[in-house]
Image (tube, helix red, strand yellow):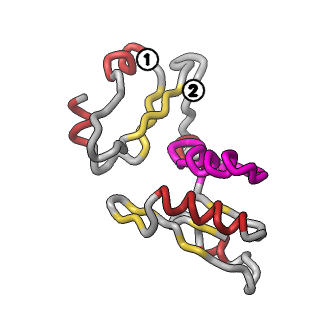
Amino acid sequence: MVYDALVSGGVLGLIPEGAKRIFAGKRSGNHFLRQEETNKVLLEEALEGRRVVRLKGGDPFVFGRGGEELELLVEHGIPFEIVPGITSAFAVPAYNGIPVTHRDFCSSVHLITGHRRADHSYDIDFDALVRTRGTLIFLMGIAALPDLMNG
């Protein structure tokens, strides 16, 4: 089992005692394994004949790099099954009674990442986002808040 920092202790407690556990967690600016290393671990464990479970918090395909992890598996013909979680972009507002759409106020939702590669600029059309008049949900944006606010 390869797991992230966002997987709760309660979920980890459900893992059988004999299961191999590999931590691949990331926190802002602090990666235990780089993404390429995590991809390689998944492939190597599968090629050794192990059934690999990749535990991630939320939806692995919403800024979760799930697609990057699958590319190497697909390239090597490794079968996989996805059981997505619920992205925090929708779970947190719902838990707090905040609709992200409402037929009287907004009919679109836009998810924007506040994270970018260190050597890249944002590839976000901020003017277009303003014109949508929809709900804008920024994820992983605390460290980048000044840049996002001035975008």
**Secondary structure type for disc 1:** loop
Name the residue: 54% across, 72% down.
23
Q: Position of residue 103 (x, y in %)?
A: 60, 18
Quadrant the C terminus occupies? top left
The main secondary structure of the magenta stretch is loop
Along the line of sight, the residue nearer the viewer: 131 or 117:
117
Along the line of sight, the residue nearer the viewer: 141 or 68:
68
Q: Which residues are magenta?
A: 58-85
19 above or below 61? below
Q: CA distance from mark 1 to mark 2?
A: 11 Å
In magenta stretch: residue 65: yes
33 above or below 81? below
Sort mark 1 into few (<14), some (14-19) or many (20+) by Cα contacts within 10 Å: few
Contact flag, marks 1 and 2 (Cβ < 8 Å) = no
Name the residue: 37% across, 16% down.
128
In the rendering, which numbered label is found on residue 133?
A: 1
Sort mark 2 into few (<14), some (14-19) or many (20+) by Cα contacts within 10 Å: few
Asked whether residue 144 appears in the rendered view, the answer is yes
23 above or below 133? below
Q: Tell me if 76 is positioned left or right of 35 in this view.
A: right
Q: Position of residue 13 (x, y in %)?
A: 68, 78
Name the residue: 52% across, 19% down.
106
Question: Mark 2 = which residue?
Answer: 101
29 above or below 18? above
Name the residue: 54% across, 32% down.
100
Quadrant the N terminus occupies? bottom right
